[in-house]
Amino acid sequence: MNNRNRGKNTGDDVLFGSQKQLDKLKMGVQDMLYVLSRGYPEKASSELVGNRYKLKTRQIQALRGASASGQQIENRKLKQLEVSDLKGKILYLDGFNVLILMESLLSGAYVFKGADGCFRDLSGVHGTYKRVNQTQRAIELVASFFQKTEVQKLVWIFDKPVSNSGRIKEIVLDYAKENKLNWEAGLEYNPDKFLAENSEIAVSSDAWILDHCQKWFNLIAYLIKEEKLDVNLIKMA
């Protein structure tokens, strides 16, 4: 196992660890809701709000991840499934989205709960995926969910252009084979579009997917509650 994790960045405690910063971020999410609901574009809105509260780059990143318009929040909630809806169903899982978020969460990085009830982090793939100390545990937690909820099949979808996507796909499939899990895994050039168009139920916290898919399930929220995970949580809304 590689000796690395996805923990906090240097300086994150200064940006997210005090009540003063938290208050600014919460007010920022309220302002974002107001301007996004009136049709203003996300980038311009986050810059406007960021300037107002003198937010740093990573704070603006967290703000954007946690924010949505009133219409988006309502639309996402209408399409969200409960765990009781999943038995016997086929789920399509946004591989890097779920895996990296779980790795961050398990590493003690800050995780942000947004206006739509989804959890997001500040990590990214950046062209290459590197396995970390928490990767195995993240896969095990997904397996626990799969078995407890009696999902028929789970299909992991990874970004083909990302370096090492083929390797993590094989790790997931090997784990499924060893543990007799009905899992599949695929590589797609445009996984967001694929998940939105080809899955009846998507598992992701990616905003674009949530806005364009048929139905979705909030896996991270389920795992935090069900597995009683210790989370360095920032509630933004």
Image: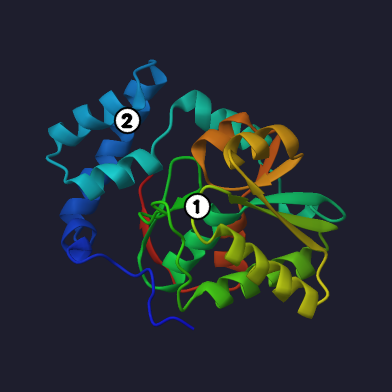
Left or right of 57, for residue 6:
right
Of callouts 2 and 1, the N-terminal one: 2
Secondary element at image label 2: helix
Q: Residue placed at 70% from the left, 72% from the top?
A: 144
Q: Residue placed at 30% from the left, 28% from the top?
A: 43
Which residue is under mark 1?
162
Q: CA distance from mark 2 to mark 1?
A: 31 Å
User: Where is residue 177 shown, x and y percent of the image?
Assistant: 79, 74
Q: Is residue 228 visible?
A: no
Q: Residue placed at 64% from the left, 71% from the top?
A: 171
113 shown above or below 215? below
Residue type (three-letter) at the residue carrying disc 2: Met
Residue 212: image quadrant is top right
Which residue is under mark 2?
32
Left or right of 175, for residue 48:
left
Left or right of 37, for residue 210:
right
33 shown above or below 9? above
User: Where is residue 141 shown, x and y percent of the image?
Assistant: 63, 71
Residue 45: image quadrant is top left
Front one among 213 and 190: 190
Secondary element at image label 1: loop
Tag in front: 2 or 1: 1
Neighbour class for label 1 at 10 Å: few (<14), some, many (≥20)?
some
Residue 138: image quadrant is bottom right
